[in-house]
Image (cartoon, rainbow, N blue to C red):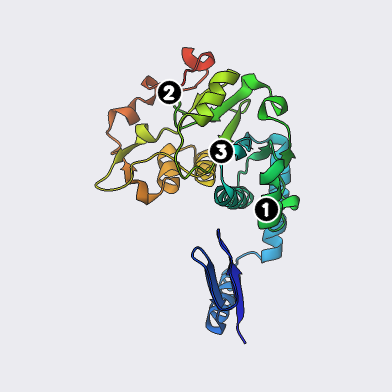
């Protein structure tokens, strides 16, 4: 008998019938054999044992909590999401943690405003959620951190993020919005007097032949772009790796003026006079 694994997304799955949205995967003997052979080959080529690698990753994560840049996912927006979107957000949080755990230079990661429905969904949907090496906090991001040190990522911001600074905390709004409601995070920043900025997609990328050309990214995609930039200090590498192909954005040639003179574009560098008076659209 084969082992059958079923994951339900937004529906109910029975033995004889799967509703739309269900993902049914069957682990065939050939697939198990292929995975074992792949792992055996990796081990013969000097790959680290899985349990050793996991211990190393957890050690690096714990060390990051004392010295690395802080990145926070702000989970205050559950009133703007339906159950399907909350489920999607919990999966994105799992991907955020997985990316951070796998990184050679992980962030000090926070999940704030973690209570209510989203906390229950994460506990139900994400295996081992309570054991994540993340600072969980039910308080608002404004109460956990000094607001003057916060930089809020928002696609509606007028300023570009060009650097990651050690004394700043970077905040990603924990919102899955299939209807694409605009100005939610930027409205919060405006009311709270927070600095906001957007990823420098326009500075380093152009529209290709086809695509959606929307700069609305998932929580984990934004996080992975920040993480890749933190590791490489290269926005071209980070954006190429993190911006999905379906958006249609492609890297600009290196001769483009914006790439030669990025300091001439609006940014949130401390040397920029707008640093303490960033405006949102």
Q: Residue at x 50, y 39 (%)?
A: 229
In the rendered structure, the answer to whether residue 223 lies left or right of residue 149 reads left
Classify 112 as above or below 83: above
- Could you say which quadrant of the image residue 50 lies in? bottom right
User: Going by the image, does 84 lie left or right of 51?
Assistant: left
Residue 111's place in the image compared with 279, above or below, is below
User: Which of the two residues, 166 or 87, is positioned nearer the viewer here?
Assistant: 87
Q: Position of residue 34 (x, y in %)?
A: 53, 78
Of callouts 3 and 2, which one flags the residue occurring earlier in the amino acid sequence?
3
Secondary structure, mark 2, is loop
Say which label, 1 or 2, has the lower sequence index: 1
Going 67% across and 38% down the picture, which residue do you hit? Answer: 110
Q: Residue at x 56, y 36 (%)?
A: 172
Question: According to the image, label 3 marks what residue?
Answer: 80
Q: Are marks 3 and 2 in contact (CB under 8 Å)?
A: no
The C terminus - image quarter? top left
Whole-angstrom CA distance, mark 3 to mark 2, is: 23 Å
- What residue does disc 1 label? 57
Front disc: 3 or 1: 3
The image quarter containing residue 193 is top right
* Pointer 2 residue: 158
Residue 14 pos. (x, y %) = 60, 73
Question: Does residue 37 appear in the picture of this structure?
Answer: no
Decide if residue 55 is on the left or right side of residue 84: right
Q: Assign a secondary structure to mark 3.
A: helix
């Amino acid at each position: 008998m084969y082992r059958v694994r079923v994951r339900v997304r937004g529906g109910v799955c029975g033995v004889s019938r799967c509703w739309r949205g269900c993902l049914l995967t069957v682990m065939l003997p050939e697939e198990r054999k292929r995975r074992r052979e792949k792992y055996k080959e990796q081990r013969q080529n000097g790959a680290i044992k899985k349990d050793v690698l996991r211990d190393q990753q957890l050690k690096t994560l714990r060390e990051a909590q004392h010295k690395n840049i802080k990145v926070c996912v702000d989970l205050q927006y559950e009133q703007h999401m339906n159950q399907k979107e909350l489920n999607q957000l919990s999966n994105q949080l799992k991907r955020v943690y997985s990316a951070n755990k796998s990184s050679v230079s992980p962030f000090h990661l926070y999940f704030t405003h973690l209570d209510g429905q989203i906390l229950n969904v994460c506990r139900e949907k994400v295996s081992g959620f309570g054991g994540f090496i993340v600072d969980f906090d039910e308080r608002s991001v404004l109460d956990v951190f000094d607001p003057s040190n916060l930089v809020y990522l928002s696609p509606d911001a007028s300023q570009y993020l060009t650097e990651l600074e050690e004394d700043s905390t970077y905040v990603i709004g924990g919102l899955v919005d299939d209807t694409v409601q605009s100005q939610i995070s930027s409205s919060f920043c405006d009311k709270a007097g927070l600095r906001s900025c957007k990823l420098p997609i326009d500075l380093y990328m152009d529209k290709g032949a086809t695509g959606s050309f929307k700069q609305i990214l998932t929580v984990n995609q934004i996080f992975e772009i920040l993480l890749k930039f933190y590791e490489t200090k290269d926005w071209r590498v980070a954006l190429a790796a993190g911006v999905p192909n379906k958006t249609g954005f492609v890297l600009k040639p290196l001769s483009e003026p914006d790439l030669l003179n990025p300091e001439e574009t609006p940014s949130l560098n401390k040397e920029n006079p707008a640093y303490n008076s960033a405006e949102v659209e």
